[in-house]
Image (tube, rainbow, N blue to C red):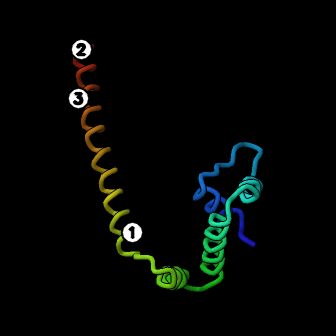
Amino acid sequence: MLDEKRVEIVARNRGIRAKAGETAAKLLTAFLRKAEEVLIGRLIVETVILLSARTQNDGGKVLRAAAQAYKVDTDAIALKVKHEFAAKAKAKLPQKVEAKPAAAKAKKSA
């Protein structure tokens, strides 16, 4: 019932990457055959949320309602993600600064 894009999202969340000549749906099906019941249950919940978000006019409300039903602290997750992105941005800045002086030194010596 999920379109190919959402199947790829579900597969990527499980660490499944489709290579040339393979489809995410085929790999996900093979994964499900070997998965434990807990993983299958999580996958079912995730696909139901994706399906309902696709069919509803306001998918954000559906996701918020699902988070509340499963007692997920969305504010804490948002804060954690914000900190992770900030840390990644800080990690990238020094690399760019270091790369420029090295290129400038190479130009001076040439």
Q: Quadrant of residue 47?
A: bottom right
Instruction: Give the foreground label among 2 and 3.
Output: 3
- Image: 10 above or below 17: below
Q: CA distance from mark 2 to mark 3?
A: 12 Å
Location of residue 3 in the rendering, given as x and y in whole percent from the top left corner: 71, 67
Q: Earlier in the sequence, mark 2 or mark 1?
A: 1
Q: Residue at x 65, y 70 (%)?
A: 41
Return the mark for residue 77. Answer: 1
CA gap between label 3 and label 1 equals 38 Å
Crowd tier of the residue under label 2, counting other residues whose Cα lies within 10 Å: few below 14, some 14–19, many 20 or above: few
Q: Residue flagged by tag 2: what amino acid is it?
A: Ser
**Please, what secondary structure does the residue beneath circle 2 have?**
helix
Helix, strand, or loop for circle 3? helix
Q: Residues within 10 Å of mark 3 (few under 14, many from 20)?
A: few
Q: Which residue is mark 2?
A: 109
Q: Is residue 56 left or right of residue 22?
A: left
